[in-house]
Image: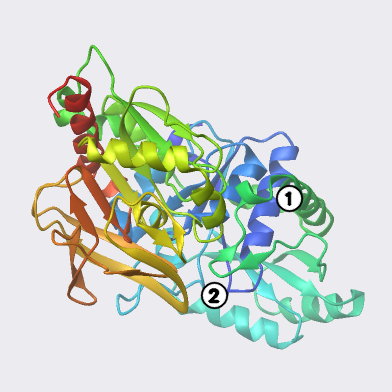
Amino acid sequence: MSGGSIPRLVIAAPSSGAGKTTVATGLMAAFTEAGLTVSPHKVGPDYIDPGYHSLATGRPGRNLDAFLCGTDRIAPLFLHGAAGADLALVEGVMGLFDGASDRGELSSTAQVAKLLRAPVVLVVDASSQSRSVAALVHGFASWDPEVRLAGVILNKVGSDRHEQLLREAMDSSGVPVLGALRRDGRAGTPSRHLGLIPVAERRAEAVESVGELAARIREGCDLPALLALAHSVPELPDAPWDPAAELAPAAGTAAPAARPLIAVAGGPAFTFSYAEHAELLAVAGADVVPFDPLHDEELPPGTRGLVIGGGFPEVYAPDLSANAPLRAAVAALAASGAPVSAECAGLLYLSRSIDGKPMCGVLPAEARMTERLTLGYREAVALRDNALAAAGTRVRGHEFHRTVLEPGAGADPAWGLTHPERRVEGFVSGGVHASYLHVHWAAEPSLAGRLVAGAARVAAGRG
């Protein structure tokens, strides 16, 4: 099997809340338990669902976001992530045709399905309908003829009689029913203010939940028919994304004789990261070492650069604050001029405090929780040279938080936002680049190269 002909399915829904994550994760687990190597993917910027996908398959969950990475990178990133897999499953985002606001189909599940030439299986919440399900499916199947809606999984079915009515209605739709799942809360996944609780915070319970999801899928879905559908795909003409090739022009910027060590925050408080970031750092010349700010009282020995991604520091603020030795070590590293990249949760961790709990004190700002959700895609430009980006570098990012930082920008802001609003945001100070903006480095690999180059200079005593 060539890389471009990897069997693949997109799992979509008419709207959020229909059960996409339940079905997609259950399918991933069921096919993995059947002996297949399954590659998991998620449409959009979401970090949490890929954690469950990874748990179900044993492979990194990867995102496919056409807004953040560009339409031309979707198939290459997919092929890179799915290399060596027997089957790739892609969980959609929101409703099938919902994408970036005011951008048409951009970043929608439908667009990604077309870019991957993949059939779509629609997960329908059937709990409050019977014959109407056929009209709903007919509308979705006919809306865009380039989207191949090839099957339906009926979710939240109430009884045998209910299932019979639904199947009879679907007989006239021309779209086959590939599964029917009963209402069942046993395998539910708890949520809080930003969505599902990440796997890293409830691993034992998550393992049990994923196992129950797999059992439900085996009972209610036609796995052979789904697998046959996945094999009915055409070849993709694209070449896989190659992080080494992306950074080839800048590969010589890191000292080849002594790879700088870049520490990457992880653990339950910092779970948001794209798999490609660590890959880019490694091919740029760094040794990438994870650490857990909740428990580790020191940075990894020899740390010359630091990446602190997103997560839930507000939930763990008391424990993060109690780890004073690590907070002091992070502050000392930042004061030394070493490159530090902090996104969202990392931004809060570098602040003076979160809801009054002392943090690292690197940034002259205070953070607090609010009821207001800040959510959406952004376009931004680097206003000056810094440890992460050269002046004028343009990026697309995503904001997703219920916190406020006061002030929201330093004397030297990290980014100038250009769309959908114009304002400055974040902090640049010495080697520190801290911002609420989540950026996918696969779209701008120079960010990783620049960070590693700065760490290499520090390691060589030239920082």
Image: 419 above or below 296: below
**Closer to us: 260 or 411:** 411
Q: Which mark is residue 210?
A: 1
Q: Is 150 situated left or right of 23 in this image?
A: left
Amino acid at pointer 2? Ala
Asked if one can make out residue 300 in the rendered structure from this viewpoint, the answer is: yes
Mark-to-mark CA distance, 2 and 1: 30 Å
- Which residue is pictured at 62% across the width and 52% down the height? 229
Image: 105 above or below 255: below
- Which residue is pictured at 46% across the width and 33% down the height? 290
**Closer to us: 165 or 59:** 59
Question: Residue 11 sits in which quadrant?
Answer: bottom right
Q: Does the CB distance between marks 2 and 1 fall below 8 Å?
A: no
Image: 57 above or below 44: above
In the orientation shown, which residue stands out farthest toward the right? Answer: 160
Amino acid at pointer 1? Val
Q: Is 110 situated left or right of 429 in this image?
A: right
Quarter of the image with the C terminus in it: top left
In x, y percent, where is residue 56?
A: 66, 44
Badge 2 is on which residue?
141
Q: Label 2: how many residues lie within 10 Å, few (<14), some (14-19) or many (20+)?
A: many
Image: 81 above or below 189: above
